[in-house]
Amino acid sequence: MHILELNNVTKHYKTITALNNVSFNVPEGSVYGILGPNGSGKTTLLGIILDILKASSGDFKLLGKPADAEIRKQVGTLLETPNFYHYLSAEKNLRIAAHIKGKGLNEIDNVLEKVNLLQRKQSKFSSYSLGMKQRLAIASCLLGDPQVLIFDEPTNGLDPVGIAEIRELIKRLSTEGKTIIMASHLLDEVEKVCTHVAIIKNGNLLTAGSVDEVLVADEIIEVSSQNLTELENVLNKMGGFTSIKKQNNTLQLFYSNGDADAAAINQYCFQNNIALNHLQTKKKSLETKFLELTNK
Amino acid sequence: MAHLLKLEWLKVKNYKAFWIFLALYIVALFAINWIAFQFQGEVKKNGVPVTIFPYDFPAVYQTISWVSSWLLYFPGMLMILVITNEYNYKTHRQNIIDGLTRQQFVAAKILFGLAIAVLTTISCFLIALYFGSTYSGSVSFNGIKYIGFSFIQTLNYLFLAMILAFLMRRSGLSLAIFFLYGLVFEQLIGGLIDFKVLTDGTTRFYFPLEASDVLIPVTFGSSVVYKNAPSQTVLIITCLIYIALFVFLSFRKFQTDDL
């Protein structure tokens, strides 16, 4: 079953199109990253799923049904910023969330413990630091032990230790079999915790699928020899790469994931009477890949 | 319904500013009536042959309702405060995200308004009983319909405040419009229509706040102030239509908005 199915979801604000025919499915048990630069439409997309925003067209299903309040009670959500009553303590705020969800009232201490806020549960929300607010919001998501969690920029405002903790928490939740949908502009975060990813830019879905497929780390083999033209002919005969590019005095061979084999190239060239004077394998960083995808 | 009332209770239970505000309002209700009572006492003592504020039954119910109505802007402020707070803290979003429907969110605020109106009305009733029995040495429920009118009037004020808060989302703007409309612009627009445009002198009685104000006419000289005013039945129907309209518009606004 798909936890979330999006069908051509479109959202227009007055003059801009925030989302343009976005469709993808989130499989059960995945950690699904929605990746995109700031203002790409990630929060708008999650807002629509949660009935905070109204889609201009298109539809979606959450847990196999058109989403309603009952479905939302089964999903733990942190959207954009931690939203709590400033004049109430952490505990009182979670009480309200539990009251609305109709569950989790006896888990308040437990979830506060998970995010290291138990000692501060009587403190007013307004006295919390940004990182503590964020952690409280994550605690609130965990009330009622939901099977699906939606996190919008979950590590926003956290210090490095906090970031590591939250990533651990997400991984742990994932191993418990929960489905996690997470929006982020941090590629590194998505790469570290997600199994699947959808990349959005300017409201358009660029690509979606498993992280291994989408964020393939391309390999590049750089070769050169005395006679580049001859080398190029030989390499073309050999094949196996996705493209070839001449740069300065070298040839760059591009391979998709796992196909590059420097030894085979060396051997093939030698058998064809070409001695390589340069052979180097390089990995294209995910960063470059991401920029490439979003700059198209 | 109990679920939604409990939700609002959880929101205000530990909200100190709210309780201070509410307590001051209730104290002020007693105080303003006490001032009027003393004033009437002075009038009588000095042998002035008119009764401005009658405190004997049944008129005391009208007196108390009329005097108290001057303070209705304060529960209105409270209404605006609790709604715009939600927008401020973005908790209106969080409530929906956590699993409230949009209708339930508005319904909870309506229940909150009803609770405040009931509290105001009960206070007025007790104040009327106190001054009425002190003045005449007996108790009567004659004329108690004015306490009922007071309830309608309170709802009218509160739900106007509510729709303004839902429309404006910000406390400052909502409060400014609420006060300026109620204290100045309703009279101004009504007056202009009545005396410059249509000149039949009755249109202003059908304005939202005025309709409920006229329902509880001033205890002296009302035949001059409210000349040509419509009958009580017409006024009650007018008020109920406005109350229904404010409620309907609040639902509609919150239901269709991007939150």
Image (tube, rainbow, N blue to C red):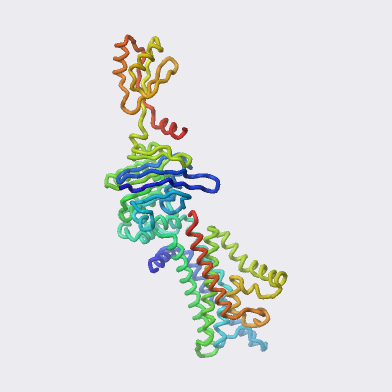
- In the rendered image, the residue lying farthest to the right is B196
- In the rendered image, the residue lying farthest to the left is A176
Residue A45 x, y percent position in the rendering: 43, 47
Quick check: can you spot residue A122? no
Relative depth, front residue between A84 and A49: A49
Relative depth, front residue between B81 and B160: B160
Tell me: residue A243, above or below residue B172. above
Tell me: residue A86, above or below residue A186. below
Q: What residue lies at 43% left-to-right and 33% top-to-bottom?
A: A293
Residue A43 x, y percent position in the rendering: 44, 46
Q: Image quarter for residue A123?
A: bottom left
Residue A44 x, y percent position in the rendering: 46, 47
Quick check: can you spot residue B240? yes
Residue A96 x, y percent position in the rendering: 39, 60
Q: Specify whether A204 is left or right of B28.
A: left
Q: What residue lies at 39% left-to-right and 23% top-to-bottom?
A: A243
Q: What residue lies at 62% left-to-right and 82% top-to-bottom?
A: B219
Q: What residue lies at 41% left-to-right and 40% top-to-bottom?
A: A35
Q: How many marks?
A: 0
Q: Specify whether B32 is left or right of A290.
A: right
